[in-house]
Image: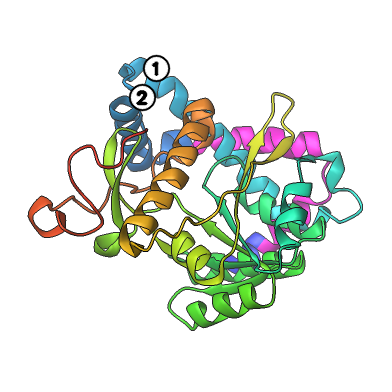
Amino acid sequence: MQYWFFKALSRFLCLLPYGLVLSTGRILGKLYYYIAAKQRNRATRQMMRSLNISKVEADSLARKMFDNIGKNFVEILRTPKLTKENYQDFITINHLERFEDALAKGHGVVLLTAHIGNWEWLGAVLAYAGLPLSSVIKRQPNDQHTRLLNEYREMVGMEIFSRGTTELVGAAKALKKGRVLAFLADQDAGPGGAFIDFLGIPASTPLGPAVFAKRFKSPIVPVFMLRDKNGKHIAQVHEPFYFNDTGNEEQDLYDITVKMTNLIESVIRENPSQWMWFQKRWNTPLNEEKQAGKHHAKKGAGKHE
């Protein structure tokens, strides 16, 4: 039932001018701010702790964050109107050649990104720009939402692997075929992650991007979709970096994961209103005794160099 409701809403939004769609998103963002008390409180609490700001400042930032989320929501539903022919009217890609150069090496590419800006449209625009894009996705709590999102992801040309299936096999095959394998690397990784300081607090951090980059000798290309002052988007492609194999696998995986984490943090600090602050990024507690000899989880281990 929810699938068909959102499908109908999507069709309606596709009939509206883009400016009116964004205005609708702003209204929905304000409503979400007031309705989602749990998410709002978690966001402001984490902002105050990580950015060292007052509650008044955090509340102002949270309002802007919910404004962005509202716009993301309506833009995602308007994805059928985003095409290979018109995406440049809404999105600018800076330094696409960095992906093209990395792909030319013949080892596939690990794409590093985060829940910032409109990350769903990032996948769409890169696929429309000609990149052979694959991604391992986390199922939404509601299967109806997952169904619609995956339908739109595949519609734009993305190859999707769902967690909890044969996603590791599919991801490995994608890199072997020379495809771009995308990771959202700002999520809690559970007990198996590397504990690295993220926004000032140790956080369990996924090692997946580093592991795939090592195994397939794939360049890592970071890219983040940011909303500009006019409501449109810039996909900023950063310089690629590479796995440095010193012979100490655990340390090497940790070091490059720190590098990736620090970059994500710097982008968030520069654009704090565009990151999804209410996600449970620090959900896994640091167990010093259990983790001290694993992933180098010691005090200060993941701080910026």
Give the numbered dot on residue 247. none
Name the residue nearer the viewer: 279 or 255: 255
Residue picked out by circle 1: 57
Residue 304 higher or lower than 160, as above or below? above
Name the residue nearer the viewer: 252 or 3: 252
Q: Position of residue 58 (x, y in %)?
A: 38, 23
From the viewer's perspective, tell me whether residue 256 is left or right of residue 101. left
Q: Position of residue 251 (x, y in %)?
A: 32, 56
Q: Amino acid at mark 1?
A: Glu
Q: Amino acid at mark 2?
A: Leu
Q: CA distance from mark 2 to mark 1?
A: 10 Å
Please report the bounds of the magenta region as a residue range.
7-32
From the viewer's perspective, tell me whether residue 13 is left or right of residue 279. right
Q: Is residue 211 magenta?
A: no
Q: Secondary structure at mark 2?
A: helix
Give the residue displayed 74% in from the left and 40% down from the top.
21
Most common secondary structure along the magenta stretch: helix
Q: Disc 2, disc 1: CB below 8 Å?
A: yes
